[in-house]
Amino acid sequence: MGLPSKRRTKTSKRDRSSHFALKKTSLVKCPKCSKPALPHTACGFCGTYKGRQVLVIKAKDKTVKQRAQERKETTKAKEAKKAEKKSK
Ligand SMILES: [Zn+2]
């Protein structure tokens, strides 16, 4: 097993770990929707980059609850179809 050949002093350990701190991510304001976005990256809210539409953003007019309700309805319909097939 590898063992350190010399004891590392408190100071040398602390000196080394002085570079371990995480840096804050820099954010810029999206020119279209003015929401915070990463620089040099397409905006995650409106999907534009340099004034061009580059990402397809799914409709945000629906709330999480509405989407959950839709999912429930579709699964119910599928189950009903399965039940119909079995009864035949
Ligand atoms: Zn945007």
Image: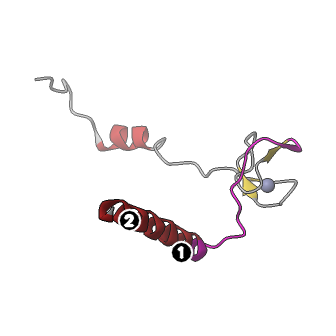
Picture quadrant of residue 86? bottom left
Give the magenta range.
50-66
Q: Ligand 1: which quarter? A: bottom right
Pick the residue in front: 80 or 25. Answer: 80
**Which residue sits at x=86%, y=41%?**
50
Residue 48 in the image: state x and y as whole percent.
81, 47
Evaluate whether residue 29 shows in this view.
no
- Front label number (2 vs 1): 2
Q: CA distance from mark 2 to mark 1?
A: 23 Å
Q: Is residue 60 magenta?
A: yes
Q: Quadrant of the N terminus?
A: top left
Evaluate whether residue 5 shows in this view.
yes
Q: Main secondary structure of the magenta part?
A: loop
The amino acid type, in three-letter code, at marker 1 is Gln
Residue 37 in the image: state x and y as whole percent.
72, 52
Image height of 31 relative to 76, above or below: above
Picture quadrant of residue 29? bottom right
Q: Is residue 72 left or right of residue 62?
A: left
The amino acid type, in three-letter code, at marker 2 is Glu
Q: Residues within 10 Å of mark 1 (few under 14, many from 20)?
A: few
Residue 61 in the image: state x and y as whole percent.
72, 69
* Residue behind mark 1: 69
Q: Is residue 5 left or right of residue 41?
A: left
* Residue behind mark 2: 84
Pointer 2 with pointer 1, Cβ within 8 A: no
